[in-house]
Image (spheres, helix red, strand yellow):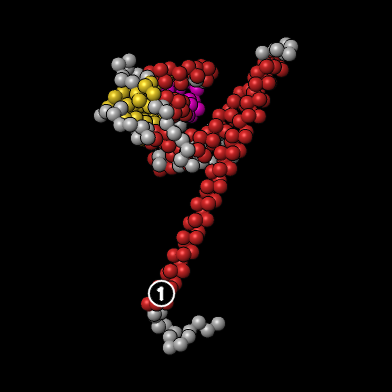
Amino acid sequence: MDLVSGSEQPGSSASPESRYSALEALYKQAISEIADMRARDALKTKFLANISHDLRTPLTAVITHAEILRDAMPGPLNDRQLESVRGSIAGGRQLLDQVGEILTYARGSADQLTLIPTTCSIAEIVQQVTRINESLLARKKITMELQVPTDLPPLHADREKVTHVLGNLFGNAIDFTPPGGRVWIHAIRQDGELVVEVGDTGIGIASEYHDFIFDEFAQVDATSSRQHHGTGLGLTIARKLVELHRGRIWVESELGGGSRFYFSIPYSSEAR
């Protein structure tokens, strides 16, 4: 097809008007594609929120009925039956936690996460998180070290969300630490902020992944044979919740040398 018209000759440059028209057409196309991507992203977020919410009710019912069997309310179970029921409960709770992560992520993506600040103690939050994980620590024979000064001033923060952040980081520390290892939680006041360190002697993270791991659905090991499974949203959510408090979160780690995750929450500034 002959694309040369009028006085334009092959090899000659297009007129300014033609170039402007071409750029304008590309700009309109880009605007349209961006709007389409935003609409698709909003649809994805809405779907995740809806499906996560709808899954919680039947999952909770399954776990409740399994607990009824475990407690022998309909009648006693033999040892093998009891072991199977306990396994069902553990798996159901793990799945429920993952559904909750997806729901929290969806709400965060839609800017529907809000803070309910109260006066809370980081020492009490640490105690709550470690108590929940006592059985797992014992099962893996992992040593726990806590350094949380009793004179730390109370926080003006959303206790539930701070607990979520600490629970996520501490759970990861245990998960990625081999049996016989060590995990710790340290908390200090520094430059007007509460700074919490959650560390472990686990497998560590190569430096090229330090920023990547906070991205949504990130998995350093994305193969089907990986040992550690999850939604890939835990650290994304932790960052979102910390940033809602006008804080920050970061990691120091090297492959084979364990990991140290830090997050800070200002004492003086108001949470959003």
- Image point (46%, 35%), residue name: 113
Q: Is residue 177 magenta?
A: yes
Q: Amino acid at mark 1?
A: Arg
Q: Which residues are magenta?
A: 170-184
Residue receiving disc 1? 19
State left or right for residue 58 relative to residue 31: right
Q: Is residue 122 above or below residue 18?
A: above
Residue 87 appears in the figure: no
- Image point (46%, 21%), residue name: 129
Residue 212 appears in the figure: yes
- Image point (37%, 21%), residue name: 119
The quadrant in which the C terminus is found is top left
Q: Is residue 4 above or below residue 119?
A: below
Q: Residue furthest top?
A: 76
State left or right for residue 261 relative to residue 64: left
144 and 82: which one is in front?
82
Choose top left, top right, bottom left or bottom right for residue 210. Answer: top left
Q: Is residue 227 above or below residue 27?
A: above
Q: Residue 257: where, in percent of width, then height? A: 40, 31
| Crowd class of label 1 (few under 14; some 14 to 19; many from 20; radius 10 Å) | few
Q: Residue 105: where, in percent of width, then height? A: 50, 37
